[in-house]
Amino acid sequence: MYKIGMIGSAADVLCFLPLGYSVLEAEGAESAATVLKNAVKSGEYAILFITEELAVLIEDEIARYKDLALPAITVIPGRAGSKGTGLAKIKRAVERAVGADILK
């Protein structure tokens, strides 16, 4: 059975542990890229959520996996709140899939 993983700083992702999600702690770009690469390579995850703060630091690494069927990599706000990065990525993905911006 596949897992759901949360990538972010300990303060951002530890709250997901009681929900049964795998918590993958990362601090900084290098750590986040390594954690993401290892999670994808393991083949254990259907979904990987990554906090906006880290996602903006490793956009190129995330882009490498965008065409894979699994895992789905989704950007979520951290504890500081949304910076709009996650919504922008979802809008681009929907536009690519549908051919038009339906989330205006």
Image: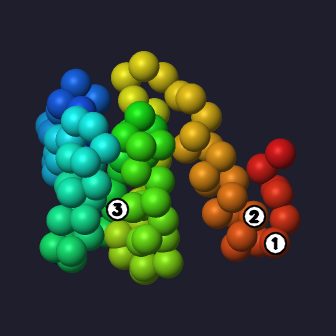
Residue that badge 1 annotates: 99
Q: What's the coloring here?
A: rainbow
Q: Residue at x 48, y 65 (%)?
A: 63
Q: Nearer the viewer, residue 19 or 73?
A: 73
In the rendered image of this protein, does residue 42 appear above or below residue 85?
A: below
Residue that badge 2 annotates: 95
One can see residue 99 in this view: yes
CB contact under 8 Å: marks 2 and 1:
yes
Q: Position of residue 64 (x, y in %)?
A: 43, 71
Q: Secondary structure at mark 2?
A: helix
* Label total for image: 3
Q: Residue furthest front?
A: 30
Mark carried by residue 39: none
Left or right placement of residue 29 versus residue 53 in this view: left
Q: Residue at x 22, y 36 (%)?
A: 27
Left or right placement of residue 20 versus residue 64 in this view: left
Crowding near pointer 1: few (<14 within 10 Å), some, many (20+)?
few
What is the quadrant of the N terminus in the image?
bottom left
One can see residue 19 in this view: no
Crowding near pointer 3: few (<14 within 10 Å), some, many (20+)?
some
In the rendered image of this protein, does residue 11 appear above or below residue 84?
A: above
Name the residue type under label 2: Glu
Mark carried by residue 47: 3
Name the residue type under label 3: Ile
What is the quadrant of the C terminus in the image?
top right
